[in-house]
Every structure is written in structure tokens, then in C-alpha cells.
Image (cartoon, rainbow, N blue to C red):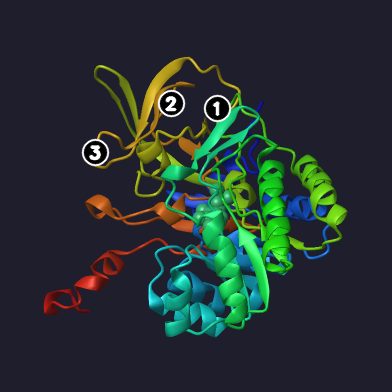
Amino acid sequence: MNDYTLPFNEEKIREIEKTFKTPFYLYDEKGIVQCVEKIKEAFSWNKGFKEYFAVKATPNPAILKILHSLGCGLDCASSTELMLAQKIGVTGCEIMFSSNDTPKEDYILAKKVGAIINLDDCSHIDFLAQNAGIPETVCFRYNPGTDFIVQNDIMGQLKQSKFGMTKKQLLESVKKLSKMGAKKFGVHAMLASCALNEDYYPTLAKELFSLALEIKKEAGIALSFVNLSGGIGIPYKPEETAVDILKIGKKVEEVYKNIIEANGMELSIFTEMGRFVTGPYGYLVSTVLHEKSTYKNYLGLDASACDLMRPAIYGAYHHITLLGKEDAPKDTMYDVTGSLCENNDKFAVDRMLPKAQIGDIAVIHDAGAHGYSMGYNYNGKLKCAELLLEKDGNVKIIRRAQKPEDYFATLDIYPEFRK
Ligand SMILES: *Cc1c(COP(=O)(O)O)cnc(C)c1O
């Protein structure tokens, strides 16, 4: 069971509000740091372990710097994400470049900064060679092409997945790149998303460790690393339970002993978690602007799907707390909405909440990953600010809210839009 304890109360938000208007994102540094420490502990048995945080989840320099200071690398997927990494001083093998359908400019920059390039397809070898050259270290993204089943649960229909290459292609790619001068190799796969099953990583590890064994036998090449990528889930819904990352680490260790160590091999484990690292530690804080009763009761917030689109596009559940009413009976059913001219702009549908009042603060939980970063500007809505609740309780702005000038920036081709 998820208890949705907040690292702040209404008084704290009322104080923050004096400086920063809602809506804003608020990230809890302490929560993020503790999570990373736990991940490191879970895989401390593996000498070369490294978490490459998936930048797309929370692409804020302040958050990325905290993660880097804890020893994390960054997983980038585009040239702009590479530039973001560069700006905060993360380069070389501290970057995993896991892209697909990659433009040549991106490969050129990835090679230039010395990132570990994760090839999504065998056809990219020549494309990379022609445009950027062959790097010393290369990773290959694997797609087993079967249903990926963990404890009778089909977690991915991989024949439908655009990602990765077949085993045959992968084996040929390793041999080819070795001939072309690459020296170190790794394999990568992400076969599920938001997995709450603690056997996801261990099952994936078994698949990739076995592949490492096959590569050794077939091509005579010992892999340097296996990248388990992201996909570890968080409990969004009240009835869901958080995974125990220490247990997951132990189970991966067992598989490692049975397959890798038993065959006299050694390799580093990498991960690319995003959601698990920042998801639970980011909150979208907003104010109730309007209450409306027609055929249903509606609470209109000052945030919209432009700030957090997961409910609108996936029907995703995000828990909502009305501050100061944590212990009040949830006796009123609401649709909690934003202001977009789209009926799917609803943070919650038929949600039981305490009776709300205009001016109440509504906190939307578990918005720390794939929240702000998915935002957009539909209806001319401007993206909100991001704030950091530091370990000592201080609140710092880490991204300002958009201004109309930002919205008009790409219209500077017209004199009337130039400043
Ligand atoms: C999205 C993504 C991740 C992170 O996924 P989470 O679900 O946030 O853990 C990691 N690696 C790759 C290649 C991705 O596309």
C-alpha cells in the first residue's frame, strides 16, 4: 500500500507561494538522494556498476547535477540532451547515448563528446562509420522478438517493438565492429515499462547474460558490460506497492553468479532508470481556481495537461492531495480538470476527495519523471516553473516559468514578434 506521505505541508507551500505562483513542480532532493543511495547499495556487489539516469525523465540541470554528484552518468537520446549533459560537465563514458532512428548530427556529437553509443540497428554501423567514425566502445540494443514473459505476465510484445535488433544481426554486428576497430562491447535491452514485478530485471539480466555467453562462444568476444536500461516502475495507484530495489539487486546477483561467474567471465552492470529515481519525488503543486457542478462536479486547477500530460494521454492515475485536508473524509466525487479546450484535460475522473474550496492547494503526486519533460504549449498555455526542496528545507528555483516571449521566440521571423 502506498501512503503518499508528503515532504512538505500546507504552511510550507503557502510560504513558497509568496515568491512563486502556482502551478509549479516541486522536487524533493532528499528523496532522490536516498533513492540513488539504495540503487548503489543494491548493485554494490558489481564492481563496475553505474546508473545512467535517463535524462528524458527529468531534464533539469539542477537535478542532473545532484545525480552526477552521486556517481550517476546520463542516458541521452538526442543532440540537445547531449548538449545538456555537456553544459553540466558530464562527458565521455559517463554518457550512454541510447537513441533510435538517429540523425547523423546526433551521432557526430555523441562521438565528439566520447559517449558510449548504443546502436539500435545493424544498419547504423555503416551510417555511424561514414558520418562520425567508429568509437572504441559500442553497445548494441537487443530485441529478442518473442513475448517477454515474467512470471506468466506478458510484459512486452517484442515483435511489435521498433527498438533493437535480432540476435543474428547483433552477433554479426559485434564481429563487424570488432573488425572495424571497436575494442569494448556491451548489450542493452529495455523490454518493459513501469514494471512493478521484482523479477523484471532478473529475467532481463538472464536474457542478456545468456546473450553475453553466446557472443563469447560465437565471436570470441567478452562483453565489458550489460545495460539493463530503465523500466522499473513506481506505485502510482493506492493499491500498488513499491519494489524493493535491494531485493532486485540480490536476484540479479544470483543470475550473474549462475551465468557470468560460473563461466569465468566478468562484466559491469549498467542501468538507465528514470522513473524510479525521480518519479515519486516530484510533485505538481496547483491551486483550485473554480468549482463547477453540472452533470458532474468539477474542480478546475491552474495547472493543465500542458504541465502533466500522462493522465490525458495514457489515462494514467496520479494521486491528488488537497493540502490541509489530508485527514478529512473523502466524501465528494470530482473530475479534476485543467483549462485546455480538450475534454481529456482531466487529472482525475470520478475521484473521491474531501470537499474542496476555491483557493485550496491540490498536490499531484508522482510527477517527478516524464512529467514536466512531456509538457507542451497547446492553447498557448505556458509551461510552469520547477523548484527544488533542498535537503535543508530551503526552496530554490531551478527553472523559471515560460513567458509569452518564450512562446513567441520561434516567430521572430516576423518583425512584430521581434523584441
Ligand atoms: C525511457 C528510457 C529509459 C528510462 O525509462 P524509465 O521508465 O523512466 O525508467 C531508459 N532507457 C531508454 C533507452 C529509454 O528509452
- Residue type for callout 1: Lys
Check the image and name the residue furthest to the top: 331
Name the one closer to the observer, 300 or 52.
52
What residue do we see at 29% from left, 53% from top? Answer: 381
Q: Which of marks 1 and 2 is nearer the N terminus?
A: 1
Figure check: 398 above or below 162: below
How far apart are the two marked residues, 1 and 2, measured between alpha carbons?
9 Å
Q: Is residue 213 visible?
A: yes
Mark 3 = which residue? 342
Measure the C-alpha gap from mark 1 to mark 3.
29 Å
Q: What element carries label 2?
A: loop
Task: Give the residue pinned by disc 2.
Answer: 356
- Tag 3 secondary structure: loop
Q: How crowded is mark 1: few (under 14 residues within 10 Å), some or many (20 or more)?
A: some
391 is higher (above) or lower (below) than 323: below
**Of 241 and 144, which appears nearest the observer?**
144
Residue that mark 1 sits on:
325
Number of marks in the rendered image: 3
In the rendered image, the quadrant that contains the C terminus is bottom left
Q: In the rendered structure, which amino acid carries the disc numbered 3?
A: Glu
Q: In the image, what residue type sits under mark 2?
A: Ala
**Quadrant position of the N terminus in the picture:** top right
Query: Mark 1 or 3 closer to N-term?
Result: 1
Residue 105 in picture, x, y percent from top left: 40, 79
Label 1 residue SS: loop
